[in-house]
């Protein structure tokens, strides 16, 4: 100190306090109960354990923590303030064992503590009648301080030898009673729900599965006191659980929106139009009760067209509802209609049906020239593209500047939904991370040659990465003409590093104990099977070492480290199936390669189930992993689920949607377990399998619990129509009659009286609008939400109380407390985009129907689309058939844009032929007197199939009056 001074500090003794772990404690029923608390600067402590009769439980609960609530002035209704401290004054309390006259079953004392130390005390309560203590108790400890004040604490102790699990839905509260010692359900037990005033609202009895179901509306009425406790009258005494719980597992939600009962699918002939065009509309209506569909009884439908999201109605009309529940309409888009997005809705009477059609009205700007990139799937280390560009009049876009980009994206491919075509394990070879696949872009510049063409080549940036076997390459070409206009085109292709690609699917062979089977595919760039390829397969056993790390106070995480051991190898000629017999349960990885063709390594994992403990990864203390196949299931099949849990036990398996459909109780002898679930049609289109796994409590220990769920997709064949279309020709000339036939089946049987909408549309317009085939099945059979919430059952139970658990301070009685890019193609004039429409074709008894139309003048590719339904609620569609309209010999005039008197011009004719590999073609040019030819009027040349040939004629303009000239090529 700079100058001499005198100072001091006064250290007061620690605040007198008795600290309990919580105001409510759950213990397993034993002959001796142990309970710990902290004693801080008090005199001798007296403790009492008293039984709480059920009729007094609600009243005791209401006063249990009253000392933590502020004292309210009865006159002002405001919180009272202690004038000595300036803090809120808390409510006074007293000792509840004495106030309620509760029968004491055990008691004791501890000596006084000084003001320096926090002493941890342990209470041991021994049953006097040699029976386990069970039911609700009040534990109260108190000490008298100098001056007469009393310091103390109390806790409700709920003691039981049963597990009460709880699930909730929007309508129900489901409870399940099971024994702690064996985790088996307990039947015939009365369970009741009571309010805080001990008024019983509902009573149920557990069934053979130990389940009792309560109505949510009864337990939680709108304007009356709701239930707070669930009480089960077990043979060992009452089991009491609170309904005010919030420790829910990651599962469903109790409040799911109700699915629409009025459902519609609205179909249009395409989704992109110009002003002045017609929109063909067909609607399908059904009334739904879960998965039961009926046809509305009304006979009139009102439809509306709204502009964008504004809900502004710009057109409406009515239509007749047929006996199939379908209707048709036509919307003539006005010539002066605003471009933008429109929606089509429908309703019956005042009831709106869920389901809309989205269409866009746009003006297509005709570009001055085309940009076409042509690619094909390749094998090797480089991608190639051919770029061409031509003006409207046919002249090549010579010397145009091109800036190109090739974006390479590595594909972590899954073939046929379940065959892995990559390796994700760095411990066995070069790996790919399917969640973070690499992507790189390479770009460059080039000029188009005199024919308006350029050849692009780009070397793979991943050629030195042995894990990469398949890449998607997206080309983008920006072509800038000499007059400065830029148009973008592009295309996509796939590049394989080897001539064959491999895929592997590993699984446990359930027909043979401790056997891994692996199915191996080999296919080429066009996904066609490659046979007789030499394959090498290795089997690795994987065990996991797990460490629990503390990352913050009360925050932990698990770190899992995998160890791989190669235990077997096989050689085979593939594709095919291999089997490995193993010695122990756990995880296995099958790695496959084809060394002769330098394919990248591919791998897949499977788990062998059984009784022996397996070293598996642990992610957290509440859940575990479930594996299942990727493909959807069908009724009659068996879903095999593999569980990877930290312990074996008894699994309460329930199949759920917004309610519980089925429950199973399955013994899982090892922590790598297998659960088999017979698939029922009621599970379609989807359901959720939740698994509550309990390891019974041996001896005096508490049981352990874990929860996990997975979704299963179920396809019902009786909901689906298969439509097989056939056209009389795959290519046709303009004006040619085209005959079509459709064969409709369901479950491999012909479907009579199926109602079909059939139309033929320009495929280029469909692609431009991003059109996709409507999924009618999902339009009427909605995916179901997960509406069952599962809650933890044992989270409040304590097996031992540690110092860290002691956080609940007590009371003081007394005074004074403290985009991908597509090609751009020239469209020279407006043709018929829709070649054919039939909205209500019907099939005969053999499931057949036919139609006929005339091929339009468009020289383009059309797509045949068929969408169907039946009165019985079956739906389907097909859009896989195309029709190419072309002429065997096509002559296109490529003429100058304008003429001036005295010009010497070149009149070009571009010729395409598709009837012979090579043919001699003679072209005759005829002009009028305003533009006489200065050379031969007839030219001949050999023209190859589908290769354009240019014929050039010389002429001189002699027209001083600037009259139009007529030029013709024959």
Image (cartoon, helix red, strand yellow):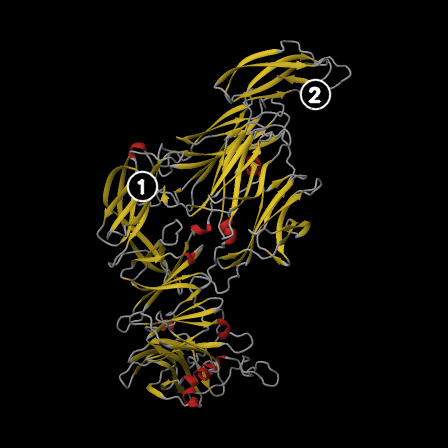
Would you place residue 930 above or below residue 184 in this image?
Answer: above
Any part of residue 773 in sight:
no
Q: Residue 706's image quarter? A: bottom left
Closest to the observer, 44 or 559? 559
Q: Residue furthest front?
A: 845
Q: Which of 113 and 415 lies nearest the eye of the viewer?
A: 415
The answer to which of marks 2 and 1 sits earlier in the sequence is: 1
Q: Which mark is residue 871?
A: none
Return the residue at label 2: 898
Mark 1 surroundings: few (<14), some (14-19) or many (≥20) residues within 10 A:
many
Q: Looking at the image, can residue 446 be seen?
A: yes
Q: Quadrant of the C terminus?
A: top right
Q: How many marks?
A: 2
Would residue 84 appear left or right of 96 to someone viewing this image? right
Residue 175, compared with residue 891, is above or below; it is below
Percent of width and height locating residue 497: 38, 33
The single residue placed furthest to the right in the displayed view is 961
Q: Secondary structure at mark 1?
A: strand
Above or below residue 756? Residue 367 is: above
In the rendered image, which quarter is residue 625 located in?
Answer: bottom left
Q: Quadrant of residue 674?
A: bottom left
Viewer-proximal residue among 886 and 367? 886
Q: Is residue 915 left or right of residue 655?
A: right
Assess disc 2: are there few (<14), some (14-19) or many (≥20) residues with their C-alpha within 10 Å of its C-alpha: few
Question: Is 213 on the left or on the right of 936, as rendered?
Answer: left
Locate residue 282, reporting x and y percent: 59, 46
Label disc, if present, on residue 520 of the rendered structure: 1
């Amino acid at each position: 100190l700079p100058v001499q001074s005198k100072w001091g500090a006064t250290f007061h003794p620690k605040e007198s306090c008795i600290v309990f772990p919580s105001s409510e404690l759950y213990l397993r029923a034993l002959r001796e109960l142990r309970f710990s608390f902290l004693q801080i600067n008090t005199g001798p402590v007296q403790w009492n354990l008293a039984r709480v009769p059920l009729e007094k439980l609600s009243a005791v609960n209401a006063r249990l923590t009253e000392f933590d609530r502020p004292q309210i002035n009865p006159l002002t209704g405001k919180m009272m303030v202690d004038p000595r401290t300036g803090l809120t004054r808390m409510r006074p309390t007293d000792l509840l064992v004495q106030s309620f006259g509760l029968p004491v079953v055990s008691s004791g004392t501890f000596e006084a503590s000084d003001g320096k130390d926090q002493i941890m005390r342990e209470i041991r309560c021994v049953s006097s009648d040699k029976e386990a203590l069970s039911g609700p108790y009040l534990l109260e400890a108190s000490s008298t301080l100098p001056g007469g004040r009393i310091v103390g604490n109390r806790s409700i102790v709920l003691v039981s030898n049963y597990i009460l699990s709880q699930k909730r839905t929007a309508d129900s509260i489901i409870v399940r009673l099971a024994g702690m010692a064996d985790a088996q359900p307990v039947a015939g037990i009365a369970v009741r729900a009571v309010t805080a005033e001990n008024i019983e609202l509902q009573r149920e009895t557990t069934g053979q599965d130990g389940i009792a179901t309560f109505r949510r509306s009864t337990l939680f009425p709108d304007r009356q006191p709701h239930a707070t406790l669930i009480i089960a009258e077990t043979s060992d005494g009452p089991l009491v659980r609170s309904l005010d719980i919030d420790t829910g597992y990651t599962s469903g939600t109790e409040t799911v929106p109700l699915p629409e009962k009025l459902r519609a699918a609205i179909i249009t002939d395409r989704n992109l139009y110009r002003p002045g065009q017609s929109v063909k509309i067909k609607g399908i209506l059904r009334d739904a009760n879960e998965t039961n569909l009926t046809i509305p009884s009304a006979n009139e439908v009102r439809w509306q067209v709204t502009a964008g999201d504004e809900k502004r109605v710009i057109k409406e009309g009515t239509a007749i509802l047929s006996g199939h529940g379908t209707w048709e309409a036509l919307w003539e888009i006005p010539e002066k209609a605003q471009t933008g997005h429109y929606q089509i809705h429908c309703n019956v009477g005042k009831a709106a049906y869920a389901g809309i059609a989205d269409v866009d009205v746009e003006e297509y700007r005709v570009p001055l020239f085309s940009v076409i990139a042509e690619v094909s799937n390749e094998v090797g280390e480089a991608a190639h593209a051919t770029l061409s560009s031509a003006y409207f009049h046919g002249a090549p876009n010579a010397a145009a500047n091109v800036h190109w980009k090739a974006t390479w994206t590595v594909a972590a491919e899954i073939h046929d939904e379940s065959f892995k075509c990559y390796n994700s394990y760095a411990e066995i070879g070069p790996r790919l991370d399917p969640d973070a696949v690499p992507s790189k872009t390479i770009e460059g510049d080039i000029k188009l040659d005199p024919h308006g063409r350029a050849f692009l080549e780009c070397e793979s940036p991943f050629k030195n990465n042995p894990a990469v076997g398949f890449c998607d390459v997206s080309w983008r070409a920006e072509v800038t003409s000499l007059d400065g206009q830029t148009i973008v085109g592009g295309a996509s292709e796939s590049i394989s590093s080897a001539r064959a690609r491999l895929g592997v699917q590993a699984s446990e062979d359930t027909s043979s104990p401790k056997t891994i089977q692996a199915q191996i595919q080999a296919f080429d760039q066009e996904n066609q099977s490659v046979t007789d390829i030499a394959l090498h397969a290795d089997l690795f056993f994987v065990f996991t070492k797990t460490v629990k790390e503390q990352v913050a106070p009360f925050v932990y995480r698990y770190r899992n480290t995998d160890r791989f051991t190669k235990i077997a190898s096989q050689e085979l000629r593939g594709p095919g199936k291999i089997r490995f017999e193993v010695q122990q349960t756990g995880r296995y990885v099958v790695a496959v390669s084809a060394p002769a063709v330098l394919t990248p390594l591919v791998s897949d994992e499977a788990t062998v189930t059984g009784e022996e403990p397996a070293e598996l990864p642990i992610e957290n203390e509440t859940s575990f992993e479930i594996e299942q196949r990727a493909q959807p299931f069908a009724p009659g099949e068996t879903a095999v689920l593999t569980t990877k849990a930290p312990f074996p036990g008894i699994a309460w398996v329930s199949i759920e949607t917004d309610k519980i459909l089925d429950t199973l109780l399955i013994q899982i002898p090892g922590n790598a377990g297998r659960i088999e679930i017979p698939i029922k049609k009621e599970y379609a289109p989807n359901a959720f399998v939740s698994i509550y796994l309990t390891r019974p409590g041996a001896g005096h220990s508490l049981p352990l619990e874990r929860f996990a769920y997975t979704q299963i997709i179920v396809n019902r064949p009786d909901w689906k129509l298969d439509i097989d279309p056939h056209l009389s020709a795959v290519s046709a000339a303009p004006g040619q009659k085209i005959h079509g036939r459709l064969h409709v089946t369901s479950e491999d049987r012909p479907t009579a009286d199926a109602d079909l909408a059939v139309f033929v549309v320009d495929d280029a317009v469909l692609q431009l609008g991003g059109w996709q085939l409507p999924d009618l099945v999902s339009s009427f059979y909605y995916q179901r939400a997960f509406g069952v919430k599962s809650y933890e059952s044992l989270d409040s139970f304590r097996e031992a109380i540690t110092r860290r658990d002691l956080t609940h301070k007590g009371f003081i009685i007394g005074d004074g407390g403290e985009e991908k890019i597509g090609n751009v193609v020239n469209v020279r004039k407006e043709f018929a985009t829709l070649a054919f429409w039939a909205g209500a074709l019907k099939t005969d008894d053999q499931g057949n129907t036919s139609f006929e139309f005339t091929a339009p003048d468009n020289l383009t590719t059309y797509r045949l689309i068929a969408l169907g339904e039946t009165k019985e609620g079956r739906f389907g569609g097909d859009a896989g058939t195309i029709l190419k309209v072309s002429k065997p010999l096509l002559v296109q005039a490529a003429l100058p844009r304008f003429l001036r008197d005295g010009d010497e011009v070149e009149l070009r004719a571009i010729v395409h032929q598709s009837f012979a590999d090579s043919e001699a073609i003679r072209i005759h040019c005829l002009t009028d007197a305003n533009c006489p030819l200065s050379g031969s009027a007839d030219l001949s040349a050999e023209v190859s199939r589908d290769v354009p040939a240019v014929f050039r004629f010389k002429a001189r303009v002699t027209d001083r009056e600037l009259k139009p000239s007529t030029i013709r090529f024959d």
